[in-house]
Amino acid sequence: MPANSCLHCSTSLETDIISFSRVYKRYPGGYEALKDVNFTVAPGEMVFITGHSGAGKSTLLKLIAAIERATSGTVLVAGQNVSSIRRPAIPFLRRNLGLIFQDQKLLYDRSAFDNVMLPLVVTGHSWRDAARRARAALDKVGLLDRERAYPIALSGGEQQRLCIARAVVNRPNILIADEPTASLDAEYADAIIAMFRSFNQVGVTVLISTHDDRPIRKLNPRVLTLHHGSLA
Amino acid sequence: MRAWLRHHALSFGQTMRRLAASPFASLLNALVIGIALALPLGGYVLLANLQQFARGLATDGQISVFLAPEASKSDIAEIDRRLRGTPGAARVEFVGREQALAGLKRAPGMAEVMATLRDNPLPDAFVVTLAASEPELSRRLEQEIKGFPRVAHVQADSAWVQRVSGLLRFGRTAVALMATLLSFALVAVTFNTIRLQIMTQRDEIEVSKLIGATNAYIRRPFFYLGAFQGMLGGLAACVIVDLAIVVLNRDLAGLATLYGSDWILQLLGLTDGLAVLAFAAALGWLGTFVSVSKHLYKIEPR
């Protein structure tokens, strides 16, 4: 396991790629989504986060990508304190993350290919280089023959795979997926989980939230269980 | 640096595609801006023309110098010499009292009035033509000539010069006020266009932020859109004003020949036209800036 693979680490002793310490998240109105959450993830780990709906799984993942801010406590991602990150630094944090959302957030006015191109366009890759990498990502999720299709023409499973292609096209260090198998039948879900497994096997840190315990029983991975905002 | 240039090229392409995607709306926006700008621009062009016209007339700015009845021939010669030596006096013409009386008698309706007079009541006079049309010069010469011996009365025909320059000043202020007001209109139109554009691209903006787009990257196409729309509006304004001048000149040519003149309105110059485009683009940029500052940062992924 690489002891220190990132350039932004604040201390040379840093070995965890993600670390939560004494993290609380209270939403306006007083609802406490996370209470005193402490855990660390080592580089290259694959971690499942489970819990009933409303237990704080999505909130926990959002804190990592600075979509939400912790009310108190420290969230370190690749050595960077995300709970106090400055706004201009957020885009550069997210470029190291592959994010897969519960509601997918695909753009329906452009083709599958253009959806996957977007992260590369944003980071200023040349068109040729970007197109090559986008096709490679589409190939990895088995959608290369569907690159001209618009998301609306894709099945639920295909849309989810398109999200994964978009998340990995920038070759992120960390993949974060919020309920990626929620609306899929077992066969599709297994294929999706297998895909994450293969990314993990080439060294990508993977965090997946799910309330489906089939893959957990099958893979026997590390599991964090949230119960009313606290880790069990 | 190359990535930055690529972003700019990309943003520009996106902007053009967006404009082309709704050509009617884009054209209408440009037209609204064009009409708003055409009013002060037209005023400006008319004023510039009037100013030139006034400058042409102003060489006729004159001062009449009436001498005292007891002025002798040598006094007249002395005053003539001094007037000619006065800086600012371009031409000095002597009008003798007999000559003036003869002139009056020739005027229609005046002959009978003149016939009732026993003596010639008119004084000897000089007409001094000014070298320049400035009211200041006119006033100065008036004061100076008043001090000459045997000069009874000095009448400066500068009142109209002052009136014209006052009118021009009034016109300039009016145009400036109108320009300021309608500039706000342009900023407001751009503000609204960009607001609508941001709203229609809400999803794209949100996703872009999630995959690591910087605010500068997200903002850029909107700035292109705002500035380009302003420039199109500026172009429309120039076309409107020049078309109006061409139409007006047709009527003016007929009118001018009646006065034995070939005076017509000058079209908007290239420099002025380019300045209008740059100004309109700058206003569009400003409208975008305000709109983006207000609306773009509110879109945060959740």
Image (cartoon, helix red, strand yellow):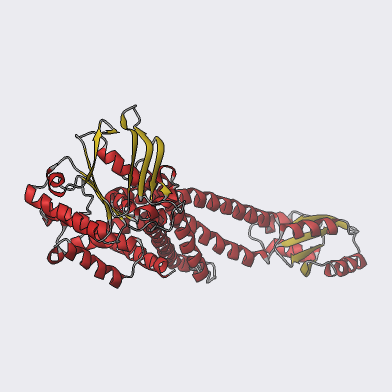
In the displayed structure image, the side of residue B136 where residue B190 appears, left or right: left
Residue B272: % across, % down: 51, 66
| Identity of the residue drawn at 26% across and 59% down | A168
In the displayed structure image, the side of residue B1 where residue A97 appears, left or right: left
Q: Is residue B219 visible?
A: yes
Residue B182: % across, % down: 46, 50
Residue closest to the eye, B201 or A197: A197
Residue A12: % across, % down: 46, 54
| The image quarter in which residue B285 lies | bottom left
Q: Is residue B35 visible?
A: no
Residue B294: % across, % down: 41, 44
Q: Is residue B171 above or below residue B85?
A: above
| The image quarter in which residue B216 lies | bottom left
Residue closest to the eye, B131 or A159: A159
Q: Quadrant of the N terminus of chain A?
A: bottom left
Q: Quadrant of the C terminus of chain A?
A: top left
